[in-house]
Image (cartoon, coloured by chain):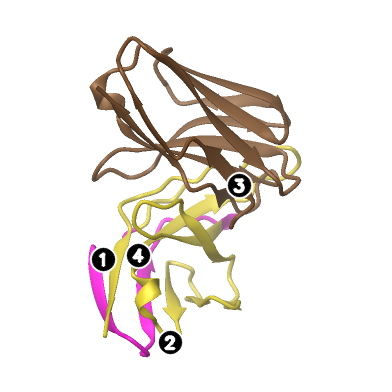
Amino acid sequence: DAKTTQPTSMDCAEGRAANLPCNHSTISGNEYVYWYRQIHSQGPQYIIHGLKNNETNEMASLIITEDRKSSTLILPHATLRDTAVYYCIVRANAGGTSYGKLTFGQGTILTVHP
Amino acid sequence: ETGVTQTPRHLVMGMTNKKSLKCEQHLGHNAMYWYKQSAKKPLELMFVYSLEERVENNSVPSRFSPECPNSSHLFLHLHTLQPEDSALYLCASSQVANEQFFGPGTRLTVL
């Protein structure tokens, strides 16, 4: 799976949009970009994933550049409860009966302040 | 609530004890995973079961022994652990290669 690079930490004011960048310059054509987050001492929570089109769900939006070498996770109106470690992971969605391995890095510590 | 439960949530054990961690998923998934998260380290994948067969074992010491009796249940049997095995142990499940859903974890302390 391709390696990802994320900033170590970011701050965001409550109510503002949080934009978390991720670089994945070695991503290959069949690899997806996944985002998870982990609130302190809890299990990671799936947020969103995409292949090449931008994606949006009730939690966030994912913007993937046209060359797919980087992406941005957008939390449109950050709240204090969004304070967490955010992980950007690249992996292939294996088909059939195979599983898709997730390799977690250090992630970005997002702190939302009042 | 993610649909993945883990028990116990906290466990303290001595190095000579034998204990088991339990994971149960209520999502109808067919793959289950054990991860370990030590302090200040990324999550490390330990074991993967797909369709109740172990498909990955990431060089985990034999003092950790997984068991997957059916697609909804996963156990991690622990014996003669070391203090450095103290960590948060996380279980996850997925429908084969789709997104994984994690349980709340078991905080293990080995004395």
Q: Which residue is mark 1?
A: A7
Give the CA distance from mark 1 to mark 2.
20 Å
Kind of residue at disc 3: Val
User: Is residue A45 in view from this perspective?
Assistant: yes
Q: Chain of mark 3?
A: B
Residue closer to the observer: A94 or B53: B53
Residue visible at 48% across and 68% down?
A68
Q: Are marks 2 and 4 on the same chain?
A: yes
Kind of residue at disc 1: Pro
Residue A77: image tag: 2
Q: Which residue is mark 3?
A: B4
Element type at mark 3? strand
- Mark nearest the camera among 1 and 3 is 3
- Mark nearest the camera among 3 and 2 is 3
Element type at mark 4? strand
| Quadrant that contains the N terminus of chain B | bottom right
Residue visible at 28% across and 43% down?
B41
Q: Are marks 3 and 4 on the same chain?
A: no
Residue visible at 66% across and 43% down?
B25
Drawn colour of chain B?
Answer: brown
**What residue range appears in magenta?**
A5-31
Asked if residue B73 lies in the magenta stretch, the reply is no
Drawn colour of chain A?
Answer: yellow
Q: Which residue is mark 4?
A: A84
- Mark nearest the camera among 1 and 2 is 2
Mark 1 and mark 3 in contact? Answer it, CB < 8 Å. Answer: no
